[in-house]
Every structure is written in C-alpha cells, then in structure tokens.
Image (cartoon, rainbow, N blue to C red):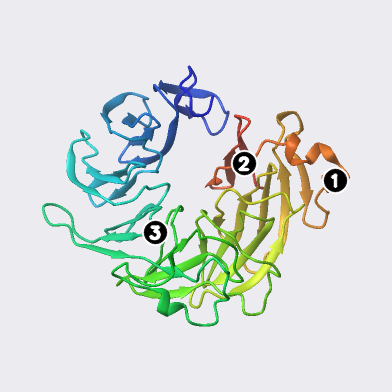
C-alpha cells in the first residue's frame, strides 16, 4: 500500500535477463529512490531511514535515521553521497559507513531537486530557491538563486524575463517553485518550475553556473497552441536541444538549449494521456511514459514516433502501435481509457537495448528494443 507500511516495503534486486528476484531487503515504510555508489545501493524511505546495501549480495552495510522522509534520489559527489530530506536537510555522508561529513538546511522543502555534476552539488526547493555548493567541509561555498514571474493575471513573456530575476530574493512578482531535479549541463543548469495560473510560455528555465539567469522558455511561434501550466519533470538533453513532456496535456516539446525557444511540439495519443514521468534519452531516441499507461519511443531530432507499447493493464500489456499506426482513442476504445489503465509515473531506465519501467499497478517491465 502506498504511503502506508506493509510487508512488501523494501528494496528488491531482479535478474535483468530472467526477471527472477535475487534478493530483498525489507524496510519499515515505502522505499523511495536509490543510487549506486561503489558497489552499494543507497536510498531512503518515507520514515526517514537511509540504508546502504551491497548491490550483489543484498547485505545491509549501514543505515541512518533522519527526522523527515527521504524521497529524493541520493547523488554521489566527490567522495561522498548527498542525501536531502523532504524538510530540506542536506547531508553529505561517507558511503563507507554513513557518517556525516557536512550538513546544511535549505530553507525550503525538497521534492526531487538534487543533482551533482563536475564536483558541484545543486539543490532546488519548493520555496523557489536554487542552491549551488562548490566546496565542502567546514566552509561551504554556496550561491543561492531564485526566479520571479508575472502576477496571476497571466501576462505574456514579452521579452522582459531578465527583470524578474533577483539574486537577493526581494524582487517584484511571484517566486517560481521548483519540484523537479535540475539538469546539469556543461555551462548551465536547467529546471522546470511551478507557478500560479497559466501562461503562453513553457515552465522551464536555465541558470548559468554563476547564478545569473540564462533564459526562460518561450514559444514565439505559438507551436503549442495552448497555455502552459506547471511542470515538475526534468528535461532530457540531446545535443543542442532539450526534450520535455507537459504534465497538463499529451504534448512533448523540443526546446533550444541556447535560447529556450520551442522548436517542435508533438501530441501522443488522447489529450488525457498526460506526461507524469521525465523523458530518457538513448542515442538519437527519446523514451517517455504517460499517465494512461503507454511507453513511447520517438526521434529526438524531429519528434517522429517510432512505436508505443501499452503497459497500463497487466493482462493487456505488450500491445504495440508502430509509428505509422494511430494510437487508440479511448472514447472509441474505452479499455485504453485512463480509468482502466494504471499510470506510469517512473522515468524509464535504459540498459543497452533494454528499457525498464514500472507501473502504478505494481509491475516492472523489461522491453527489448530491436533497434
């Protein structure tokens, strides 16, 4: 049962070839996200426990207890593993024994906003602050940033985004909130954000590494043809562009990495098949799952759909619709409707030619991609 302790709570290892369970470590509450660090699988639970388990053996090497749930995926940074609780407590732990190397409070709740790259650590909060840590130990080099947007009347972007940015946090307008994981690129950090009301530009923003605002997403040619709401998803990077799904619709769109301008928009299936998982890139293709139980593959360059596979009901899982076949209209074929389908909320994981994805129905599927 989600959000309630039960006998199935825990961490599982499965053989990728056969699907057979290799080992299981039971926890006292729902186990959330995890990461792999030097032979260990490290992750946290709803009760605030963080455990480190041998990836091959399933042996528990250490565990720690925090005062709030640990739902965010831990990340390795330098010789530590970073943990952040939902209350915003950031801890750098020694992966060998779980001891604390450094600790800091973020001043806001954290949903998924933890990422590391090039020896730096980035934390995004629901309070709308982005924290960059470039040094660790007794003195932590820290830079905080925020972004503001027009009031709830829904003003258009009109090319004046730079005036909303205020490093000190006392600018005019409303502060955007960050729920997703930052995407760390070579010279900038990209995040989706949440705001009141709906606007004519996508909720995605880029900060330069010095904390200055790089761009706010735009749709000058009105390719989306609709207003944009909130987003808590993480974009995927492909060469000079970013790919992002829209949590409020069935749309995916490509954004220029340099300017934030929308380059193309594609719709996947019925309008109720919203995107609730972040996309994953492998080679020249993107994989994204929907609330309606579909997993889609499409080209990153032009957004052309290659195939879609239905996983929303276990007894119907595996039905495939190639790119030249129309996706089912659940109003005409209600068995594919959202009320009959288990959503896919997890981001697909890719290992070679295999795509691994879990559904809210409780099944984990391994898809062999022949291409």
The label nearer to you, 3 versus 1, is: 3
- Compared with 128, 368 (above or below) is above
| Quarter residue 357 falls in | top right
- Compared with 186, 179 (above or below) is above
The quarter in which the N terminus is drawn is top right
The furthest residue to the top: 7
Residue 302 in view here: no
Foreground residue among 3 and 93: 3
- Compared with 324, 28 (above or below) is above
- Compared with 13, 255 (above or below) is below
Residue bearing the label numbered 3 = 128
* Mark 1 neighbour class, 10 Å CA radius: few under 14, some 14 to 19, many 20 or more: few
At 64% from the left and 42% from the top, the residue drawn is 368
SS assignment at label 3: loop
Res 331 label: 1
Q: CA distance from mark 2 to mark 3?
A: 27 Å
The label nearer to you, 2 versus 1, is: 1
Task: From the top left corner, tell me how far across and down residue 194 is, in percent.
Answer: 50, 58
Q: Reading the chain from its start, which is encountered first: label 2 or label 3? A: 3
At 62% from the left and 79% from the top, the residue drawn is 220
């Amino acid at each position: 049962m989600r959000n309630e302790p039960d006998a199935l709570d825990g961490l599982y290892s499965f053989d990728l070839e056969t699907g057979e369970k290799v080992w299981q470590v039971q926890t006292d509450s729902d186990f959330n996200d995890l990461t792999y660090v030097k032979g260990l699988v490290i992750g946290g639970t709803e009760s605030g426990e963080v455990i480190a388990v041998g990836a091959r053996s399933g042996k528990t090497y250490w565990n720690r207890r925090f005062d709030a749930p640990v739902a965010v995926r831990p990340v390795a940074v330098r010789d530590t593993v970073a943990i952040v609780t939902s209350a915003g407590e950031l801890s750098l732990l020694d992966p060998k024994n779980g001891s604390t190397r450094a600790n800091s409070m973020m001043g806001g709740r954290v949903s998924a906003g933890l990422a590391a790259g090039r020896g730096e650590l980035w934390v995004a909060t629901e309070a709308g602050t982005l924290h960059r840590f470039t040094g660790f130990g007794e003195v932590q080099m820290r830079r905080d940033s925020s972004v503001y947007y027009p009031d709830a009347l829904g003003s258009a972007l009109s090319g004046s985004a730079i005036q909303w940015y205020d490093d000190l946090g006392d600018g005019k307008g409303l502060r955007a909130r960050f729920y997703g994981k930052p995407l760390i690129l070579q010279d900038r950090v990209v995040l989706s954000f949440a705001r009141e009301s709906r606007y004519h530009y996508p909720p995605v923003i880029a900060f330069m590494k010095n904390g200055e605002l790089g761009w706010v997403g735009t749709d000058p040619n009105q390719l989306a043809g609709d207003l944009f709401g909130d987003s808590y998803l993480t974009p995927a990077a492909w060469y000079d562009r970013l790919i992002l799904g829209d949590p409020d619709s069935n749309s995916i769109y490509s954004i220029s990495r340099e300017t934030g301008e929308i380059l193309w928009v594609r719709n996947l299936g019925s309008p109720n098949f919203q995107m609730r998982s972040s996309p994953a890139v492998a080679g020249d293709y993107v994989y994204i799952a929907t609330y309606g139980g579909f997993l889609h593959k499409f080209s990153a360059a032009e957004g052309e759909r290659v195939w879609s596979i239905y996983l929303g009901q276990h007894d119907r899982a595996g039905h495939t619709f190639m790119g030249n076949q129309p996706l089912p209209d659940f109003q005409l074929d209600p068995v594919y409707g959202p009320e009959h389908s288990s959503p896919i909320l997890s981001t697909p994981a890719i290992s070679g030619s295999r795509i691994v994805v879990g559904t809210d129905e409780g099944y984990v599927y391994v898809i062999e991609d022949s291409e």
